[in-house]
Image: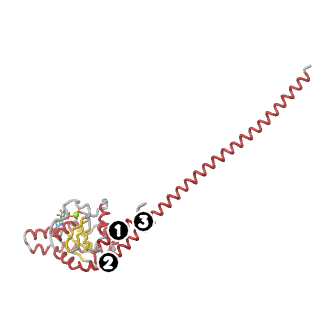
């Protein structure tokens, strides 16, 4: 049997370590620019970015004084990497949910993912710890085109996740990088990266201040998870014992049936033997009578 106590202690130690820092974690579907966004915030390419599924493991990078940017694999219903991503979201002080606007408004799987993230968030008041980031905004010809996608996405999130009043940002990583490379301040300004970075920086202290409450909530949740796992294991063991007892009872019954059949067979054999013995005695007596008669009458 697993050492649940050791496992629980390990989980608490990890939660305690997280309580000393601020975790800013990206989330969203694969290839939506999650890694690129964190690289823009860092002003260097730390996380791999490519036009195919790229990030397959959770990776953390220290950004500022005990503030970490955590890159996660893109959500994909067919992938086991999702488990690692959802594990990482539990550790978030803030979730940056990334959606690229050249795919249109948020898709069903993004809405489902967001609902799941909302439910596993331990800190309470998810809206204050969640930002929606519209990326690849450079793909839209006009601000009006962009607004249509953003408004529809926000309405869908309100209707299907019950979330509103959270911060959202429009970001172009390519415009930001171009601005940086070409020293074009206007591009950097228009990219939306500075606005997001400033918002995050303004909230560092607030999120640090909440860490003790988040820690307690996470430990309480971890405890509930362990209790449910223990209960499941107990039910499994009980079911196994019950099925074993049933097999033993069946075997006992088969054995008793065989013994009874053998006994009854023996009783039948005995009674046949007795009746045949009696018949043999009778025949012996008849033979004797016949012999006696023959002896008497032969002269
Ligand atoms: N035009 C444009 N392309 C972008 C932008 N942000 C990211 N990209 C490109 O989009 C592709 C995917 O970016 P990534 O950052 O690797 O996406 P990801 O969400 O981390 O992908 P996974 O790790 O596979 O989940 C890369 O080719 C990026 O260069 C943007 O703002 N504008
Ligand atoms: Mg990535």
Q: Is residue 275 visible?
A: yes
Q: How many marks?
A: 3
Q: Is residue 118 above or below residue 58?
A: below
Q: Please report the residue visible at 36 percent of the width from the left and 73 percent of the height from the top.
A: 219
Marks 3 and 2, the one that precedes in the sequence: 2
The residue tagged 1 is 11
Q: Secondary structure at mark 1?
A: helix
Q: CA distance from mark 2 to mark 1?
A: 16 Å
Quadrant assignment for the N terminus? bottom left
Q: Secondary structure at mark 3?
A: helix
Q: Which mark is residue 215?
A: none
Q: Can you tell which quarter of the image residue 111 is in?
A: bottom left
For label 3, being within 8 Å of ligand 1 is answered no
Q: Can you tell which quarter of the image residue 63 is in?
A: bottom left
Do residues under tags 2 and 1 come within 8 Å of each other at their CB atoms?
no
Residue 30: horizontal and vertical position, in percent?
25, 63
The residue tagged 2 is 212
Marks 1 and 3, the one that precedes in the sequence: 1
For label 2, being within 8 Å of ligand 2 is answered no
Residue 225: horizontal and vertical position, in percent?
40, 68
Residue 160: horizontal and vertical position, in percent?
33, 72
Q: Can you tell which quarter of the image residue 202 is in?
A: bottom left
Q: Please report the residue visible at 30 percent of the width from the left and 69 percent of the height from the top.
A: 89
Quadrant assignment for the C terminus? top right
């Amino acid at each position: 049997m697993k050492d649940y106590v050791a496992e629980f202690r390990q989980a608490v130690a990890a939660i305690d370590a997280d309580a000393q820092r601020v975790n800013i974690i990206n989330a969203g579907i694969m290839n939506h620019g999650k890694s690129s966004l964190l690289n823009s915030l860092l002003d260097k390419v730390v996380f791999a970015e490519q036009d195919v599924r790229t990030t397959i493991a959770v990776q953390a990078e220290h950004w500022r004084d005990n503030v970490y940017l955590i890159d996660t694999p893109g959500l994909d219903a067919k992938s086991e990497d999702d488990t690692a991503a959802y594990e990482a979201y539990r550790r978030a002080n803030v979730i940056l949910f990334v959606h690229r606007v050249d795919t249109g408004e948020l898709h069903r799987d993004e809405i489902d993912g967001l609902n799941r993230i909302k439910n596993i968030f331990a800190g309470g008041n998810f809206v204050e710890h969640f930002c929606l980031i519209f990326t690849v905004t450079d793909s839209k010809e006009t601000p009006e085109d962009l607004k249509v996608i953003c408004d529809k996405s926000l309405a869908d999130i309100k209707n299907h996740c019950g979330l509103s009043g959270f911060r959202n940002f429009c970001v172009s990583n390519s415009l930001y990088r171009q601005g940086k490379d070409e020293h074009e301040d206007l591009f950097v300004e228009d990219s939306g990266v500075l606005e997001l970075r400033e918002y995050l920086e303004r909230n560092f202290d607030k999120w640090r201040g909440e860490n003790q409450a988040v820690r307690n909530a996470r430990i309480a949740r971890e405890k509930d998870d362990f209790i449910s796992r223990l209960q499941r294991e107990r039910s499994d063991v009980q079911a196994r014992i019950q099925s074993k007892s049933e097999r033993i009872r069946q075997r006992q019954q088969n054995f008793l049936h065989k013994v009874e059949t053998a006994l009854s067979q023996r009783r039948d054999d005995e009674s046949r033997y007795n009746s045949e013995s009696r018949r043999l005695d009778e025949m012996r007596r008849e033979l004797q009578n016949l012999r006696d008669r023959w002896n008497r009458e032969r002269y």
